[in-house]
Image (spheres, rainbow, N blue to C red):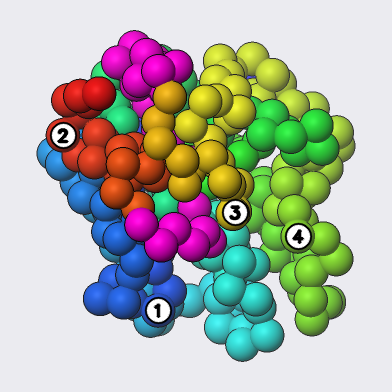
Amino acid sequence: MVNIAPHRPHTIWMLWSQGWDDAPKVALSSLATWKDNNPGWTVRALNKQSALEVFGSDIPDTLLREDLPIEAYSDVLRIELLARFGGLWVDATTICAKPLDQWLPEYGYNRDFFAFSQPGPDRMIASWFLYAPAQGYMITRLRDLMRNYWQNRSKRDDYYWLHKLFEQATLSDPEFRKLWETAPHIPAKQPFHFWSQSLRLSQPPTEADWITLKSGQWPVFKLTHKILIPDPENTLFEVLQNYASSRKPTP
C-alpha cells in the first residue's frame, strides 16, 4: 500500500521563461487570475533563471542542459518542481475561472495526483495543469522515468514524450495504474480548451459561449499565446481573459 504524503502544498508554479516583464497579455491575465482567485495560495511566477534558484545548490542535472527545447524544458521543470516541493503547476496561458478551494479538494487534496484527463485519443492526461504532493508516488515515478528518458538522448523523439511516459508508467506499474484509475477525473476537452491558432478565439463569443460562461461549470480555461488577433476587442479571446478576472460576464 502506498503512503500518500499528507502535506498538501498550497503553491502554484508558473513559468514564462523569458521573464514576466516581456510576457504577453494572456500570460499576465493568467497570472492575475491565479493570484486574485486563490488568496490562500502562494503563486511562484518563475523565469528560466529564477526556476533554477528554487532548487538552491541541488539543481537536477536535466535542468542544466542547454540542448532542451523550451517546451521540453518546461515539461522537465514542472515534474521536478512537483516531485521535490509539491503543489500545482499551471501553464501561463491557463485561466483560473473558479477558486481552487471550491473544487480541487474533491479531486486532488486527498489524492496522489491530479491532471485533466484524455485531451486527445493518444494522451491520457493534459500536462498544463498538474497537482501532486511532494514525493507523492505517481509524481516521483514519473520523475524517475523522465530522468531516465533524457539520460542518453539529446532530443525528444516525440512532442508528447511526457505523455508517453505517463502511459508507460500506467502500463508497467500496477500501483501507479491503480492510483490513476481510482481517482476522479475531469475531461480536458471542454468548451474553452483551445489549441494554437484557434480561429474561434478571434471571433465574437456566441450565445452558447455566454451560457457556458454563466453556468460556472468549468474551473479553468486553456488558452494559447500562439495566435495573432489584430483587433482583440469583443473577441472570445478577450472575453475569457476579462471574465476570469471579474467573474461577472455581461453579454
Residue 129 visible somewhere in the drawing: no
Q: Which residues are magenta?
A: 207-231
Disc sitting over residue 246 in the figure: 2
Q: Which residue is mark 4?
A: 159
Q: Which residue is mark 1?
A: 18
* Residue positioned 70% across, 65% down in the render: 147
Q: Is residue 137 left or right of residue 225?
A: right
Q: CA distance from mark 3 to mark 4?
A: 14 Å
Looking at the image, is mark 1 or mark 3 nearer the viewer?
3
Q: CA distance from mark 1 to mark 3?
A: 19 Å
Residues at badges 3 and 2 in contact (C-beta under 8 Å)? no
Residue 218 lies in the magenta-colored region = yes
Q: Which residue is mark 3?
A: 196
Q: Quadrant of the C terminus?
A: top left
Looking at the image, is mark 2 or mark 4 nearer the viewer?
2
* Residue positioned 48% across, 76% down in the render: 59
* Residue positioned 55% across, 20% down in the render: 186
Looking at the image, is mark 2 or mark 1 nearer the viewer?
2
